[in-house]
């Protein structure tokens, strides 16, 4: 599935997600539901939150895989899995478990698409 298609599906299925961006392994924006500048801003927020969470004492050696920031006006969710990161802003009173499930499912689609792409044999169109 194309990156933009996965995000379109997410936004169609989840009325709780307002904005979303997916970051590749090196932190660049792979896909975003918003303008380029806003996608880059979401990426900076996501990497900053993950870095701060990783520095939290008592976390052990494992990298943090999820950060949630909620306030009465909405939330920011960051999920890290298999080198990818997805960040989303939500409406007020979003259901955290549902948002996390939807974001993890979207990252799973990216991982599946990558596996298929890597296994596809090279074509010789000559």
Image (spheres, rainbow, N blue to C red):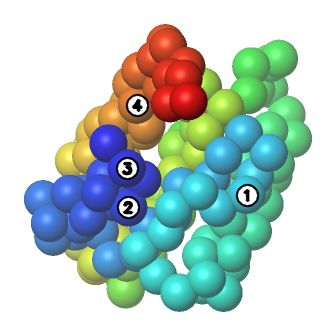
- Name the residue carrying label 2: 4
Q: Observer-nearest residue: 50 or 36? A: 36
Q: Quadrant of the N terminus?
A: top left
Density class for disc 3 (Cα within 10 Å; few <14, some 14-19, many ≥20) is few
State whether residue 22 is above or below residue 90: above
Report the disc number at residue 2: 3
Labels 3 & 1 near each other (Cβ < 8 A): no
Labels 3 & 2 near each other (Cβ < 8 A): yes
- Name the residue carrying label 1: 28
Report the disc number at residue 113: 4
Q: Residue sitting at 68 percent across and 78 percent down?
A: 41
Query: Which circle's residue, 2 or 4, is located before the other in the chain?
Result: 2
Circle 1: element type: loop
Q: In the visual, does 119 lie left or right of 53?
A: left
Q: Position of residue 107 (x, y in %)?
A: 42, 38
Q: Residue sitting at 38 percent across and 61 percent down?
A: 4
Q: In the visual, does 86 lie left or right of 106?
A: right
Q: Position of residue 35 (x, y in %)?
A: 53, 87
Distance from Cα at disc 3 to Cα at disc 2 = 6 Å
Q: Residue sitting at 40 percent across and 31 percent down?
A: 113
Which circle, 4 or 1, is nearer the viewer?
A: 4
Density class for disc 4 (Cα within 10 Å; few <14, some 14-19, many ≥20) is some
Q: Residue sitting at 41 percent across and 74 percent down?
A: 33
Distance from Cα at disc 4 to Cα at disc 3 = 8 Å
Distance from Cα at disc 2 to Cα at disc 4 = 12 Å
Density class for disc 2 (Cα within 10 Å; few <14, some 14-19, many ≥20) is some
Query: Which circle's residue, 3 or 1, is located before the other in the chain?
Result: 3
Q: In the visual, does 27 lie left or right of 114?
A: right
């Amino acid at each position: 599935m194309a990156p933009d298609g996965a995000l379109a599906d997410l936004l169609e299925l989840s009325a709780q997600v307002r904005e979303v961006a997916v970051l590749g392994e090196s932190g660049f924006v792979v896909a975003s539901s918003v303008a380029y500048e806003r996608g880059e801003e979401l990426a900076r927020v996501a990497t900053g939150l993950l870095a701060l969470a990783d520095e939290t004492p008592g976390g052990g050696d494992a990298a943090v895989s999820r950060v949630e920031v909620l306030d009465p006006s909405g939330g920011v969710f960051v999920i890290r899995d298999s080198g990818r990161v997805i960040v989303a802003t939500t409406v007020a009173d979003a259901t955290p478990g549902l948002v996390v499930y939807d974001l993890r499912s979207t990252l799973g689609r990216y991982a599946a698409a990558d596996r298929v792409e890597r296994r596809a044999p090279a074509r010789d169109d000559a």
